[in-house]
Each structure stands twice: as C-alpha cells, then as structure tokens.
Amino acid sequence: MRKLFSECQEAKAKGLGIGYFSLNSKGGCPMCHGDGVIHRHIGFGNFIDLKCDKCDGFGFVADTMKVHLDGKTIKDCLEMSVSEAYDFFKDKDEVIANILNVLIRVGMGYIKLGQKTPTISGGESQRIKLAKELSKGKSAKGVLYILDEPSTGLSFYDCEKLLHLLNELVDMGNTIILTEHDTSMLSNCDWIIEMGPAGGKNGGYVIAEGSPLELKKNPSSIIGKCLKTK
C-alpha cells in the first residue's frame, strides 16, 4: 500500500518515498511519533491524551497527508476495514487484494488496516498469521502449524469458513495441531487427544484418543458424545 502511494504523482513531485507513508518511519509526526496524540502526565501515575497540534491528530507529517490515491489519503486507507479496503484495492494491486481476500475468508473482514497490535486478540492474531500463510499459495507446503483455540470469538458461520481454510492448508501438504473446545472443529480432526477428566489440578491426564468416531464409541471420552461423525 505504501508503494502505491509513493508512486502517485503528488508523491513524486514532493520526492516522498515509501518511508513517508509509514508512521514508524519518515512519515510519522516528529512531535507525537505517529500516535496522533500527546500523552501528558498529570501526576500520581495518571496520563491524559491530547490531540497533537502539529499533525492535527492524523499522525502523519503534513506532506504525506497531501498525497491522494483515488481521493483517499494513507490515513483514510488505514481507517478502512479489511472488507472496505478489499473493495478499494481489488482493481489496483493483485497482491494486496489477495491478502485482504484471505483475511475476509478467515473471518477478519471487520478489523481496520491500521488497528494497533495491542488491541488485537490472540485468536485474531493467529488468524492473521494463517491468512498470511494461505496467501503464499502453493509455496506454503510441508509446514507444521500449531494453533491455540483459533475459533475463539468466531460465530458459527466464521468457524465454518476457518475450518475450510484449515483444510486447504492440509490439502496443500501441511500438518496442523490445535487445542480446541469447539466440537464442530474437533469433529473434523483426523486424531484427537482428549485431556481430563476435569480442569486445573483435577485434569492433565489423557483420558481418550483416536478419531472422532473412535471417541464417540469410547466410554472414557467426555467429549465423544458431542462429536459429529460421518
């Protein structure tokens, strides 16, 4: 995206390279360091955030904010959701569109492009990394992926989409190990190792293992009766 903006006529006329379209490089306001706000200490360990006067809260230097790509500044693009950004970039850059499309397919169409890392949950972070791997296409092969409850926070509909994409990775020749509680996800695993019989100090033992069908028939399994088998 930064490359597209640096190739605009406005950017070339001002001599603005890719770095001017990054908050962490030349494009970041020198006063607020790209945050758009100034953190003021008011005593007793408390802070208040005040809009930066130098960049008017945009975070970017003035010259960067004067460059437009089809009427949008870099700040406008960072405020877009992934779904909105896909519609905007799909006819402009194939690589960007492909990555955004995969993010939508893993149920991440709602997050903003410029969303700060601390506000992204662990499950969201995993799905973003998963999207990155899927966007590589056939080059992502022979990899072992370990996921910690990737379905957390997803609706049933989005879980179905995630499951489809995990199967894509497997079909490409990869192996996936995951910890999960969602029975729809577990029902599609090739092999399950069930830990129990309870949580905390009352757990930690292997109480059953096998395919979903084998667990369904295993009287020691707690989760087996909840699994769906073909």
Image (cartoon, rainbow, N blue to C red):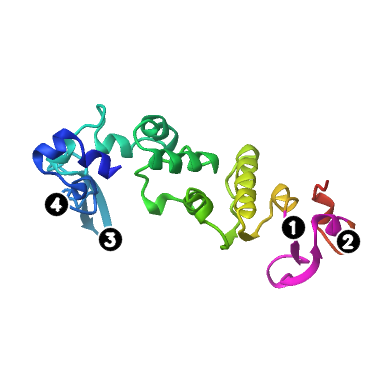
Q: Earlier in the sequence, mark 4 or mark 1?
A: 4
Q: Which residue is mark 2?
A: 218
Residue mark closest to the camera, 3 vs 2: 2
State the mark number for residue 190: 1
Q: Secondary structure at mark 4?
A: loop
At label 1, the amino acid type is: Asp
Answer above or below: position of 91 versus 28.
above
Residue at image position (19%, 44%) is: 60
When asked about the image quadrant of residue 41, the answer is bottom left
Q: Secondary structure at mark 3?
A: loop
Q: Residues within 10 Å of mark 3 (few under 14, many from 20)?
A: few
Q: Which residues are magenta?
A: 189-216
Q: Secondary structure at mark 1?
A: loop
Q: Which residue is mark 3?
A: 45
Q: Secondary structure at mark 2?
A: loop
**In the rendering, at what x and y percent does residue 107 appear?**
54, 41
Q: Which residue is mark 4?
A: 30
Instruction: Answer left or right for 137 relative to 57.
Output: right
User: How much space separates mark 4 and mark 3, taking CA atoms?
Assistant: 25 Å
Answer above or below: position of 4 versus 221.
above
Q: Earlier in the sequence, mark 1 or mark 2?
A: 1
**In the rendering, at what x and y percent does residue 71 appear?**
24, 27
At label 3, the amino acid type is: Gly
